[in-house]
């Protein structure tokens, strides 16, 4: 197997844009007033979806890299509280943290010193680096679709 090609495909999967919108595309042009609007009583806002993606991605990344990491309680630790008055600073911090962690995941996927198929030394039940990277990609893709659907329901999607 060509690890370079494999790593490139993983990075592409994590960044999106091949079979679905990228995170940048999903957030581009979103009206600030709609960031916290829930389209339905049981739905989530764009910010809630993004922050959920950030929290889950951070947890999986830190679990993968840090034996002392303690995951938040499930499921409440993976979803933010509803924010009616989300500040521009809080939005920007969430977006920046999401992308910073995503870049760390991509860097891990391209690290030639890491055998992605090997078990994480402190991992549970045979978890491998590859499993965790794919879990992040899968989870992000699902919730990215939710963001697009939320924007469509709010009449704020032109993509």
Image: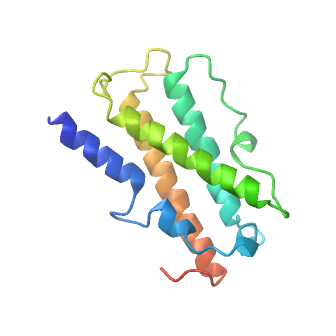
Q: Residue 136: horizontal and vertical position, in percent?
A: 48, 44
Which quarter of the figure has residue 105? top left
Q: Residue 35: horizontal and vertical position, in percent?
A: 71, 68
Residue located 49% across and 44% down the image: 102
In the image, 116 versus 103, the foreground residue is 103
Residue located 64% across and 43% down the image: 55
Where 36 falls versus 74 (above or below)? below
Left or right? Give the position of 13 relative to 159.
left
Where 125 falls versus 78 (above or below)? above
Instruction: Look at the image and tell me whether residue 51 can be seen.
Output: no
Left or right? Give the position of 73 relative to 157.
right
Q: Residue 119: horizontal and vertical position, in percent?
A: 38, 21
Which quarter of the figure has residue 151? bottom right
The colour scheme used here is rainbow
In the image, 14 versus 94, the foreground residue is 94
Left or right? Give the position of 42 relative to 138.
right
Q: Residue 47: horizontal and vertical position, in percent?
A: 69, 60
- Count the marks: 0
Residue located 75% across and 60% down the image: 88
Residue located 39% across and 29% down the image: 129
Left or right? Give the position of 127 relative to 3.
right
């Amino acid at each position: 197997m060509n690890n370079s090609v494999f790593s490139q495909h993983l990075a592409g999967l994590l960044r999106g844009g091949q079979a679905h919108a990228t995170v940048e595309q999903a957030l581009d042009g979103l009206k600030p007033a709609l960031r916290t609007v829930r389209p339905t009583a049981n739905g989530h806002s764009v910010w809630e979806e993004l922050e959920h993606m950030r929290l889950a991605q951070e947890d999986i990344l830190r679990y993968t890299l840090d034996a002392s990491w303690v995951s938040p309680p499930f499921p409440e630790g993976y979803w933010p509280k509803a924010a009616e008055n989300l500040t521009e600073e809080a939005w920007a911090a969430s977006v920046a943290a999401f992308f910073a962690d995503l870049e760390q995941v991509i860097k891990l996927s391209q690290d030639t010193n890491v055998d992605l198929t090997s078990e994480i030394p402190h991992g549970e039940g045979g978890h491998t680096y590859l499993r965790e990277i794919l879990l992040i990609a899968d989870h992000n893709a699902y919730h990215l679709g939710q963001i697009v659907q939320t924007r469509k329901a709010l009449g704020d999607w032109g993509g």
